[in-house]
Amino acid sequence: MAKNSTAIANHGHSPSETSSRCFTESLTATHNFEVACYSLLAGMGVGKYISSCIFSVGGHDWTIRFYPDGNNAECAGNASAFLYCSSQPKGVRTKFTLNMLEKEGKVLVTSFGSLEHTFSSPIDDFGFSKFVEKSRLLKSSSDATGGYFTIRCVLTVIKEPRTELKRNLFVVPRPNLQDHLQQMWKDGQGADVKFSVSGQLFSAHRYLLAARSPVFKAELFGPMTEKATESITIDDIEPPIFEALLHFIYTDSILDDWDSKEGKTTDMQHLLVAAD
C-alpha cells in the first residue's frame, strides 16, 4: 500500500522528459620541421637531440625532438624522433603521426601510422626510437640535397568531453504572411480606402497598395491627392478583373479558379493592363 508515491506525485500526468548531449571536440594542425646537413649532426652522441620551434595546438605548446644518433643505446644504427609537450600537460589526449620526407617534402621516406598517447607530465614525450636508419640519412647527405629532409607531424589534440542539457527548441511554423494578408483583405479590418468599380465597392488598405504598386502610390499619396478621399472611382475595368488585381496585390498569387474561367486569355490581358 505504501508504493503508490509515483502515481500520487505525477497526479495522472505523463512523466517529464529531458535530454542531454555529450560533445567531444578536437583540434588538428601540421608542423614541418626541416633538418639540413645531417652529416654534420651525426656523431652528436646517443641521447643528444635537436628541437623544432614551439608550435601551439589545442592550447598546449609542442616541439619535435630529433636524435641524430638515437635516444638510447638500444636503437644503435637508427635516428629517433619524438613529439614533446613543452607546456604543463595534465592528461592531454592526442593522436599524431611523425614521418620523414625528402625532396622538399615531396617524397615520403617513412610511413608510420597514427599514434595515440596521453601526455601527463612535463617530461613526457612519445614517438619512435627507431625512426629511420642512419645509413639512409648518411647516403642522402652525399647527394645534391646535402642531407636535407623534413619531419612532418600531424597532431590532433582531443579536448575533454563536455555534456550540456539540450534545450527544447520552438518549432517555427511555415511562413503564412500571404494567408494573413488575404484574410485581412477579406475581413476588411483596418481598411481605410474604398474603390468603386462599376457600382461595386471594394475595401482595401492604402499603405499596402502603395507599397505594392507605384500606380496606387501616386493615386493615394501623390501631390494632387486629397487626404479626405475615402472612395475612388475606377473606370475602364470590370469588377472581377479588379478583384483579381487586389487578390494578387495582397497574396502575390492568382485566384484559384482563374484557369476555369472562360475567356481567361482576354481577362489576363485586362489584368496586366490594370496592374500596369
Image: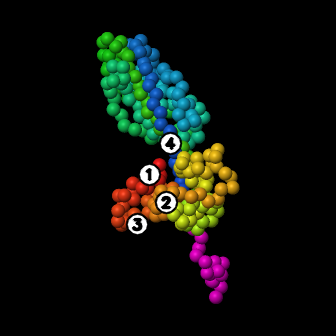
The answer to which of 198 and 39 lies nearer the viewer is 198
| Alpha carbon separation for disc pair 4 and 2 | 63 Å
Rendering coords of residue 57 (x, y %)? 53, 34
- Residues in magenta, as a range: 1-18
**Could you tell me the amino acid type at mark 2?**
Phe
Residue 242 in magenta? Answer: no
Q: Are marks 2 and 3 in contact (CB under 8 Å)?
A: no
The residue shown at (52%, 45%) is: 25
Rendering coords of residue 229 (x, y %)? 65, 56
Given this view, does label 3 or label 4 mark the residue nearer the observer? 3
Q: Which residue is mark 4?
A: 26
Question: SS for tag 3?
Answer: loop
Q: Which residue is mark 1?
A: 273
Question: SS for tag 2?
Answer: helix
The residue shown at (63%, 83%) is: 4
Which badge, 3 or 4, comes first in the chain's sequence?
4
Which badge, 3 or 1, comes first in the chain's sequence?
3
Query: What's the mark number on residue 257?
Result: 3
| Alpha carbon separation for disc pair 3 and 1 | 20 Å
Q: Which residue is mark 2?
A: 242
Q: Is residue 84 above or below residue 51?
A: below
Given this view, does label 2 or label 3 mark the residue nearer the observer? 2
| Alpha carbon separation for disc pair 2 and 1 | 11 Å
**Could you tell me the amino acid type at mark 4?**
Ser
Q: Is residue 37 above or below residue 233?
A: above
Asked whether, in this view, residue 156 is left or right of residue 149, the answer is right
Given this view, does label 4 or label 2 mark the residue nearer the observer? 2
Quarter of the rendering containing residue 223: top right
**Could you tell me the amino acid type at mark 3?**
Asp
